[in-house]
Amino acid sequence: MNTQATILITGATSGIGESLLHKYAEEGYRVIACGRNTQKLQQLADEYHDVVPLAFDITDIEEINQSVMQVSGIEKIDILMLNAGDCRYIDNAKKFDGALFSQVIATNLQSLGHLLEGFLPKVPAGGQVVFVSSSATLLPFPRAEAYGASKAGVDYLAKSLALDLKAEAIDVTLVHPGFIKTPLTDKNDFSMPFMLSSEQAALRIFDGVRARKSYLHFPKRLTLLMKMLALFPDVVWQSIALRSNKK
Ligand SMILES: NC(=O)c1ccc[n+]([C@@H]2O[C@H](COP(=O)([O-])OP(=O)(O)OC[C@H]3O[C@@H](n4cnc5c(N)ncnc54)[C@H](OP(=O)(O)O)[C@@H]3O)[C@@H](O)[C@H]2O)c1
């Protein structure tokens, strides 16, 4: 009987997801690696015997359905790691970019419904679902109307699903990373305190998921400070946020 555990990672071609792929592959997992970058997926599959490349766009329902068919031979997915995401900013609030808002919601939140519909049936009792959200949901940030709203939706989805999956004996982990050095944050032009490497982030996620924790947040020197600030009246954070947003 094959006892090798299987993990499916979305967004495995870059940043946190790629570091997770390396960690899980090195720990002996079969990794179903997802992303749109087929060249990178093939490179990862060439590197590890047990990496299965699965190329699809998470905003395309047809492509998701085809991918579900492609892995129909794999009997179970022990860990469903929903990590893929994008961060884009609303640069002019008065000239609100509705298309950008929709695209960010589609990538970070709406996709999750289709991914759950396709892949959750493969997660057995004792399995796990992991949502990589963001510590950005702890406080409102300027220009983050789209990204923050999408990730706040992910938080609610994860917490609600955790309740409903109890009966199925499937554990849910919600992850709130702080700033992690990846291509996503390389685009940012503001200061990002207490930044971690993607390897450090992956290790924290790996350990927390193995311990079956329901909630992970790191680095704590950032997230605990944010949680404390969130306890004060809104005006306190607003004055800090507006001061630090001045060029
Ligand atoms: N970096 C941070 O500081 C930070 C902080 C908090 C939360 N997060 C969250 O962590 C997750 C990973 O972010 P990261 O920093 O590692 O970003 P990244 O290096 O830009 O990687 C994003 C990954 O998502 C995939 N992806 C994006 N859009 C996709 C689409 N439409 N279809 C399929 N795959 C798609 C990309 O794959 P392809 O390009 O191959 O499609 C890529 O593998 C995201 O959900 C992000 O919001 C990051």
Image (cartoon, helix red, strand yellow):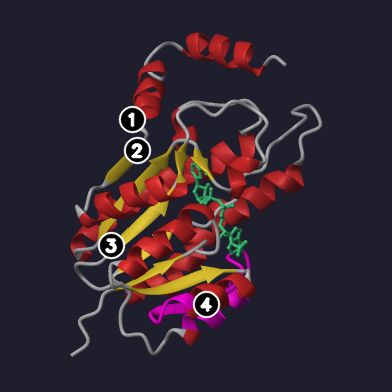
The amino acid type found where label 1 is placed reads Lys
Give the residue pinned by disc 1: 220
* C-beta proximity under 8 Å, tags 3 and 2: no
Q: Is 104 on the left or on the right of 113, as rendered?
A: right
Place of residue 109 in the rendered image (x, y in percent of width and height, measured from the top left): 53, 52
The amino acid type found where label 4 is placed reads Leu
Residue closest to the far right: 95
Give the residue pinned by disc 3: 128
Question: N-terminal of the two: label 4 or label 1?
Answer: 4
Cα distance in 3D space between marks 1 and 2: 7 Å
Whether residue 160 is visible, yes or no, is no
Residue at point 25%, 73% (across, down): 124
Residue at point 74%, 28% (across, down): 93
Place of residue 38 in the rendered image (x, y in percent of width and height, measured from the top left): 62, 75
* Magenta highlight range: 47-69
Question: N-terminal of the two: label 3 or label 4?
Answer: 4
- Quadrant where the N terminus sits is bottom left
Characterize the local packing of mark 3: few (<14), some (14-19) or many (20 or more) Cα atoms within 10 angstroms: many
Cα distance in 3D space between marks 3 and 1: 24 Å
Place of residue 205 in the rendered image (x, y in percent of width and height, measured from the top left): 33, 50
* C-beta proximity under 8 Å, tags 3 and 4: no
Place of residue 135 in the rendered image (x, y in percent of width and height, measured from the top left): 44, 35
Give the residue pinned by disc 2: 217
Q: Is residue 42 above or below residue 147?
A: below
Q: Is residue 224 above or below residue 22?
A: above
Cα distance in 3D space between marks 4 and 1: 34 Å
Report helix, strand or loop for mark 1: helix
Question: N-terminal of the two: label 3 or label 2?
Answer: 3
Say which of marks 3 and 2 sits in front.
Answer: 2
Give the residue pinned by disc 4: 54
Question: N-terminal of the two: label 4 or label 2?
Answer: 4
Cα distance in 3D space between marks 3 and 2: 18 Å
